[in-house]
Image (cartoon, rainbow, N blue to C red):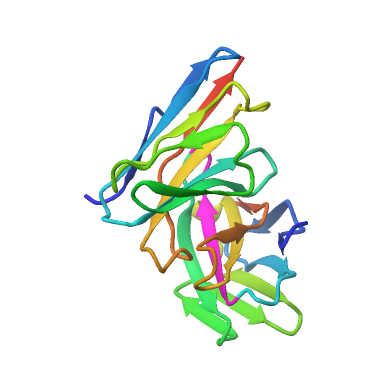
Amino acid sequence: DGGITQSPKYLFRKEGQNVTLSCEQNLNHDAMYWYRQDPGQGLRLIYYSQIVNDFQKGDIAEGYSVSREKKESFPLTVTSAQKNPTAFYLCASSILDRAYEQYFGPGTRLTVT
Amino acid sequence: DQQVKQNSPSLSVQEGRISILNCDYTNSMFDYFLWYKKYPAEGPTFLISISSIKDKNEDGRFTVFLNKSAKHLSLHIVPSQPGDSAVYFCAASVAGRDDKIIFGKGTRLHILP
């Protein structure tokens, strides 16, 4: 079964700690994306990557970091510099020239207290 | 500056009736529009799309209408079913540019029995 997996589903951290969210896809997609969703808000783009070892900042990249060492994997680190890290985080992927057809993972709900 | 606007945060419709979800956009460069459906604590799933060269696209119970002069699109669901209760996100992209899609804030649709 092809798809995108995100783990864990729920994550709890203390303020001041960095935390890494996992995203893996076996769709052979070149492009991968990280979004954050807050109540009453749309999906806001954090980072995206079109090729291994390369990535670009989205609209709200401050306080986040990513890596793309493998085509299948695009982990997101929420650093202690992110002022409001509690949110629902969504990973997506797409064929390189078809960013308009993104496939989403199930999401990770991060709660920082 | 919201480029994709969904002005109705929520909508309630009787089962069996037509649901109409609206979306406005400001960027005249957008040439591809999508609707995603999202259940709580899950990732969005692609529902239907339309290219700017068309004014209508139909897929089963779902039809999307595009009015380019008004920069407006709408999603019609006929007949509405209980499983349609979800948040619907309108999204838009400029094909070949930046490889990003811009999401609206979503409309929560409640199908009433």
Evaluate whether residue B13 shows in this view: yes
Q: Find out whether residue A2 is within the magenta segment.
A: no
Q: Is residue A103 left or right of residue A85?
A: left
Place of residue A8 in the rendered image (x, y in percent of width and height, measured from the top left): 39, 27
- The span shown in magenta is B31-41
Q: Where on the picture, by quarter, is residue B88?
A: bottom right
Count of numbered marks: 0
Q: Is residue A34 left or right of residue B23?
A: left
Q: Main secondary structure of the magenta part?
A: strand
Place of residue B23 in the rendered image (x, y in percent of width and height, measured from the top left): 69, 66
Q: Find out whether residue B35 is within the magenta segment.
A: yes
Identify the residue shown where x is 72% and y is 62%: B3
Q: Which quarter shows the N terminus of chain B?
A: bottom right
Name the one closer to the observer, A78 or A35: A78
Identify the residue shown where x is 55% and y is 25%: A79
Name the one closer to the observer, B62 or A76: A76
Place of residue A63 in the rendered image (x, y in percent of width and height, measured from the top left): 60, 31
Identify the residue shown where x is 21% and y is 50%: A1
Place of residue B68 in the rendered image (x, y in percent of width and height, measured from the top left): 69, 82
Evaluate whether residue B81 shows in this view: no
